[in-house]
Amino acid sequence: MLDTARILGGVLTPIVSEGVLARREVMVRLGGRLNTHERAARILDDMRDTYGADALRLRFPRAMIVALRPLAVREILSSTPDPFTSATREKISAVGRFQPTGVLISDGQRRTVRRELNEFALQTASPIHSLHQRCAEIVASEVDDLVGSCRDGRLTWDSYVVSHWRMVRRLVFGDDARDDEEVTDLLTVLRHDANWAYAFPRRKSTYFRFRRRLEHLVAPAPADSLAGLIRDAPVEDRADVDPIGQIPQWLFAFDAVAVAVHRSLALLAAHPDSLDRAREDVRALEHGGPPRLPFVRATVLESLRLWPTTLAILRETKRDVDWVGDVLPAGATTVVIGEYFQRDDEAMDFAQQFTPDAWLDGRAQELAGVVPFSDGPGECPGRNVVMLFSSLVIAALLRQHGLRDDTLTPRVRSGVTDMPHSLNHFDLTIELVPDDR
């Protein structure tokens, strides 16, 4: 019981407190001051050393299994959706508030057809989405406005996030939605409610307003928008599949993209050699061709490895499962703490360092526990859209500017520079330095 209490109190409670579906600024700041992320890692280290197991079953009113080793992560994620479904009771209660027909909480045949529809619109199988040129145009124009609005060349979270959502709305719905803040504001309200899952009453009227706003924006969306692609996709039973109902997940995911971009800029600002390499990517991009930007993308992936935007990956057993020397009953919840495995000193020698080259030489991809976009059949279908969008935003900022930052303060231990376990994006300010070349 003591170990269960330690995990509940020291690992899971801080995650819930910070906000699983919408970050609570006060709690994120408090978590950084209390160093809750590093404390959670030490607790999980103790559990792994004590039990020597791949996963630990907690003594809890309901069966709950916490992964302790990468092999458990691989087993859980590779066995989605059967027997480990992503449509857990917790997610249905929370995420269902703003995407009740979304693929994330769908199962069976509905999950299959909704997943296929998402992959069609997001072009999951293609390394670079066909809308890459349109995306680049949107980003370039909005970043110009963003830079012009930065006081004294200081890029704050508050200034960036306004520009970010303008870019997202244009990419998803078309240019006419640029300033339609109502749709994203309503989603934010629903996401904050969803943080409370079972404990907060549903705002049905707010959801219906949100849904009506989505329908209003999707109907005239141009063909060169993500909404246009999913609206016009060949679907047999549109009422059951609900193409429009898939879009809230995209908007939800783009919130995490904003955080990843801001942290990536801080990483580059704190590592001048890496900043130079990123700007080499940008110069190569100016010569034409698809926007590959390999080092910039590696930087984004590394920011997601060091500070995952998905704090915990949940799955639920659909039936009794023989696993880790035990029988997991149907309805058991499995928990993967992404940050723990992505900064696992036992699995990699660069766990605490900023190491973008690990994504270029394949070391990171080979690690079973490094899953910034989840993994297996449940991997994020929008991964390539996320990488395209985020790398283009960073490239647009680097075209005319260098970066300086005094917020990210790495720790130097035995001559090695370690990244902090927490990086509060709300207080992160990047100084844009005009290019003097």
Image (spheres, rainbow, N blue to C red):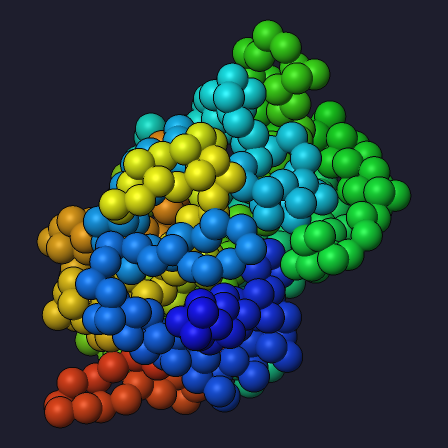
Dividing the picture into quadrants, the one containing residue 41 is bottom left
Q: Which residue is drawn at 70% across and 43% down?
A: 98
Look at the image and tell me whether residue 300 can be seen.
no
Q: In which quarter of the image is the C terminus?
A: bottom left
Q: Quadrant of the N terminus?
A: bottom left
The spot of residue 382 in percent (x, y) is: 44, 39
Dividing the picture into quadrants, the one containing residue 105 is top right
Image-based side of 267 in relation to 24, left or right: left
Image-based side of 335 in relation to 149, left or right: left
Q: Is residue 301 above or below residue 420?
A: above
Q: Is residue 436 above or below residue 127?
A: below
Q: Quick one: 137 or 360, which is closer to the camera?
A: 360
Q: Quick one: 314 or 427, which is closer to the camera?
A: 314
Image-based side of 417 in relation to 85, left or right: left
Look at the image and tell me whether residue 55 can be seen.
yes
Q: Residue at x 40, y 29 (%)?
A: 82
Image-based side of 188 in relation to 73, left or right: right
Q: In this view, does 28 lie above or below 76?
A: below
- Total marks drawn? 0
The spot of residue 151 in percent (x, y) is: 60, 81
The spot of residue 185 in percent (x, y) is: 75, 55
Give the farthest residue toward the right: 205
Q: Residue at x 25, y 45 (%)?
A: 325
The spot of residue 56 in percent (x, y) is: 34, 58
Q: Which residue is drawn at 56% across and 81% down?
A: 29
